Image: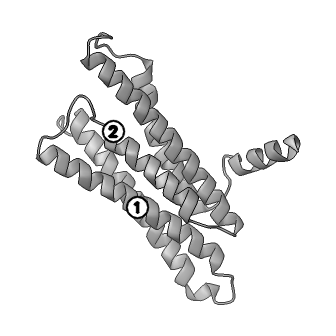
Amino acid sequence: MSIFFSSVAFTSFLSNFVIWCFLMATLLNFVKMSGWQFQNVDKDRFKEPLLLSAIMFLSYFLGSVIDYFLNLKEFISYFHPNSYYFLLDILTAFFIYKAVKVSSKQGLICKLYLLCGLLFNALLFLIIQIEVFLIYEGFKPYEHWWLWYVFSIGINTFDAMMVLVLILQKDFLKLHFLINKALNCSE
């Protein structure tokens, strides 16, 4: 039982659980879009969260596959242990921003939350990547500090936020409301 709570085993479990959550969000949105109970409803408002959840699932699944093959070939370096996650988050956010056009309120809320979550995750990956590089080069001693805790809690919190918004399709943190209010006040 103690091996489960080791860092590598627990991280692997958590990573697979997040991928499974994105898969379940995709399947739930597919059922919502194709369900018989919504025959007379505008399907575009269900199609956009389905597309966004499928993109997120594929992105996280691709990250897991890359991680598996890099660990299999022992290609992980101290210079770039998390850089592929950083790049994948940036590329996914760029793809969602440029390629996915939304017209419904649910799609807009989901897109906003996904972009915020991906960009904050990318920022955390970049900061921790710089930290590891500084430790490896000897500019900073190896010791635990608050940023590592912020990283581990922040990544999981933003992942949970993105899964929840794809399932609920509601502005539960009022990000959409606050951004609209800020943009309207500045005009």
**Mark 1 sits on what residue?**
57
Across and down, in percent, residue 20 comes to 36, 59
Asked if one can make out residue 5 in the rendered structure from this viewpoint, the answer is no
Alpha-carbon span between mark 1 and mark 2? 19 Å
Disc 1 marks a residue whose amino acid type is: Phe
Left or right of 156? Residue 40 is right
Q: Of all residues shown, which one is farthest toward the front?
A: 98
- In the displayed structure, 111 sits above or below 147; it is below
Across and down, in percent, residue 61 comes to 33, 58
Label 1: state its secondary structure.
helix
Left or right of 170? Residue 29 is left
Task: For label 1, count other residues whose C-alpha is less than 10 Å away and answer few (under 14), some (14-19) or many (20+).
Answer: many
Q: Quadrant of residue 97?
A: bottom right
Left or right of 28? Residue 37 is right
- In the displayed structure, 69 sits above or below 131; it is below
**Mark 2 sits on what residue?**
83
Across and down, in percent, residue 51 comes to 51, 70
Label 2: state its secondary structure.
helix
- The residue at the point 40 percent across, 64 percent down is 23
Q: Quadrant of residue 44?
A: bottom right
Counting residues from the N terminus, which is met first, the one under dot 1 or under dot 2?
A: 1
Disc 2 marks a residue whose amino acid type is: Ser
Left or right of 77? Residue 118 is right
Asked if one can make out residue 43 in the rendered structure from this viewpoint, the answer is yes
Q: Are marks 1 and 2 in contact (CB under 8 Å)?
A: no
- The residue at the point 38 percent across, 28 percent down is 128
Q: Of all residues shown, which one is farthest toward the left?
A: 73
Name the image quarter holding the C terminus: top right
